[in-house]
Image: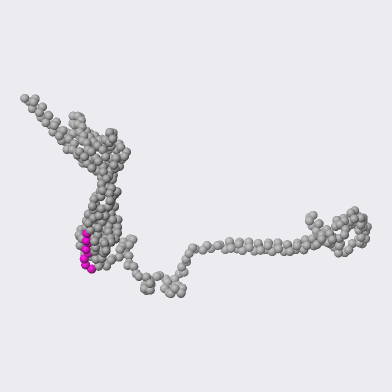
Amino acid sequence: MGAAVWTAVLVTAFVSCHALLDLSGVHQINGTWMGSATIPCTYQPSEGFTQQTLSWSVERDYSTSTILRRDDSGDHILLSRFRDRVSVPKHSPGNVSLLIENLEIPDSGHYTCQVVWRSKNNSLITKEVTTTVKVVKVAVTKPVVVAGERGLTVPAGARTSLSCVASGSPPISYRWFRSSPGGKARLLGHQAELAWDSAQPSDSGTYYCEAQSRAGAAQRSDAVRLTVTGSPVPQQPSPGPGGHSRAPLTPQGNVPQSVPTDLPAATLVSGRDAISKGPPVVTGAPRAVLPVSVLAAVLAGAAIGALVAALRRRRRDKAEPLYEVAFHSTADVTGLEADVEAPVKCLHKETNSKTETSNDTFNMKDSVHGSMCTRKDPEYENLVSAMESEYEIERI
């Protein structure tokens, strides 16, 4: 009898423990393309049992792959296409649900959650649950306009806003319109929220929004009427950089402009006059100042260059008449009946052989023309002397 009771107690305890460690999940969920989805997997923690491992796997096209594995060393993403897109809560005992972000169409499949526990007697208990995930493209729903805290009737100068709320496969684009008389609408913006920092009575009107995603056509919301009551509130200058308020803009034209008069060390005068007081103001790039020694060297070099040029010019002027005489002498000699070389050779030989003989007359037979040297003309003698002097100079 006693053995039967103990057996019944143990069986009850075992069954109750398994019941506590049983995993809870759902059979199927639908995920929105480019959105996020959470695949539930939970259990009730039981004293005496410690979670040993956790794994998530996916089956698609008759192939099973492990996505994530958690053990004592941490979480490990084993499938590259899920990297940076899946996660499991770390500080929520009993909750091992899988969060998948940026869902893609190939993410559809059968996901299995498997948990292994270890008991105090080192026995292992394994449980798992499978959920089917279907990723679909969802067209955007009809948007709803949500007014700000003050509602659709606000006092002038108050801050208010209108929000366009819609669901569907992201990304979702928004557009705001304001109805105008005649049935025309004016485009106001492309944000999900239309806000006013200081509403004015002129902002009263009828507004509506449109929402659109890649999965379908644009959807339009119902129009709402915004009413701003009271008198217009003057616009305060908006703060500029550094937190300082910017002065309001002044009109351009012949409006007299105020000129500050607290400039230091200067007197304000008309544009045709010069500044009468204060230190001179240097504008532009500073001018380089050369040392005195450099200026002196430059001047001395210029003077020496001018002197050399003058000397060369003077020497050239002196040399030109000499060459002019030599040129004309050659022409004169060429114009004579006898050859130029014959009189020169005759005079040269006669002078060397008969130094004591008078220069008035001498006879010498010409080897070319057969003519005899006769008395020399004084002009011809001077011309030959000049040629000999020139030849003497060239030899030197």
**Residue at 85% in and 63% down:** 382
Q: Is residue 191 above or below residue 128?
A: below
Foreground pick, 80 / 285:
80
Q: Is residue 148 visible?
A: no
Q: Is residue 63 above or below residue 313?
A: above
Foreground pick, 334 / 47:
334
User: Which quadrant holds the C terminus?
Assistant: bottom right
Q: Can you give x and y, in whole percent of width and height, for residue 359 in the image?
A: 91, 60
Q: Bounds of the magenta span? A: 224-231
Q: Can you give x and y, in whole percent of width and height, for residue 225 in the image?
A: 22, 61
Residue 79 is drawn in which quadrant? top left
Q: Is residue 390 visible?
A: yes
Does the magenta-highlighted stretch encompass residue 219? no
Horizontally, residue 375 falls left or right of residue 29, namely right
Residue furthest front as drawn: 182
Q: Can you give x and y, in whole percent of width and height, for residue 91 in the image?
A: 22, 41
**Residue at 27% in and 59% down:** 177
Q: Can you give x and y, in whole percent of width and height, for residue 102 in the image?
A: 28, 44
**Residue at 20% in and 30% down:** 124
Tell me the chief SS of the magenta region.
strand
Q: Is residue 308 above or below residue 46?
A: below
